[in-house]
Amino acid sequence: MDTLTAEEAAKFLRLNVKRVQGLAREGKLPASRIGRKWLFQRTDLERLLATEHPAAIPAEPFAALSARNHLLGRITNLRIEGIMAEVEIDIGGQKLVSVITSSSAIRLRLEVGQQVYAIMKSTEVMIAREPIA
């Protein structure tokens, strides 16, 4: 059985370590506390992620985000070429285009027709999606 520290579990779940510790403290993540350290079983986390509505995934799309401007839309066109990807999103009938790295598009598993968030901060537009079930 593979036992993970809070840091390893956070990396596995792609969450902040403080968020993982908080979820464990609230009983929303299966964990054991040994002294001051939280320990997680990889199989428990994998099983949790495989459920349709895992309790560890927050109801809000983002655990914490400094940008206040995030708009929900649907990908209408996706072009990945070389190290860059162009993502075209329809937001309420308006077209928004964002250029991100191709590795980010692949990591997010972006696809045409998928619902995503366009996040604007200052002069940047970032792309986010809800956790993969």
Image: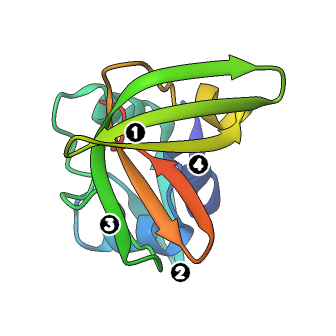
Q: Which residue: 30% across, 25% down?
A: 50
Q: Secondary structure at mark 3?
A: helix
Q: Secondary structure at mark 4?
A: strand
Q: How far apart are the alpha carbons under marks 3 and 4?
A: 15 Å
Q: Which mark is residue 45?
A: 1
Q: In terms of sequence position, does the residue under pointer 1 or pointer 3 come before the other?
A: 3
**Residue 23 in the image, given as x and y percentages of width and height:** 32, 66
- Judge whether 116 appears above or below 57 on screen: above
Amino acid type of the residue tagged 1 in the rendering: Leu
Q: Which residue: 53% across, 66% down?
A: 16
Amino acid type of the residue tagged 2 in the rendering: Arg
Q: How far apart are the alpha carbons under marks 2 and 1?
A: 20 Å
Q: How far apart are the alpha carbons under marks 1 and 3?
A: 12 Å
Q: In terms of sequence position, does the residue under pointer 3 or pointer 2 come before the other?
A: 3
The chosen color scheme is rainbow
Q: Which residue: 43% across, 70% down?
A: 19
Residue bearing the label numbered 3: 23
66 or 40: nearer the viewer: 66
Amino acid type of the residue tagged 4 in the rendering: Leu
Q: Which mark is residue 36?
A: 2
Q: Which mark is residue 4?
A: 4
Q: Are marks 4 and 2 in contact (CB under 8 Å)?
A: no
Of marks 3 and 2, the one in the foreground: 3
Q: Is residue 22 left or right of residue 101?
A: left
Q: Residues within 10 Å of mark 2 (few under 14, many from 20)?
A: few
User: Is the C terminus in the top left, top right, bottom left or bottom right quadrant?
Assistant: top left
Q: Are marks 4 and 1 in contact (CB under 8 Å)?
A: yes
User: Is the N terminus in the top left, top right, bottom left or bottom right quadrant?
Assistant: top right
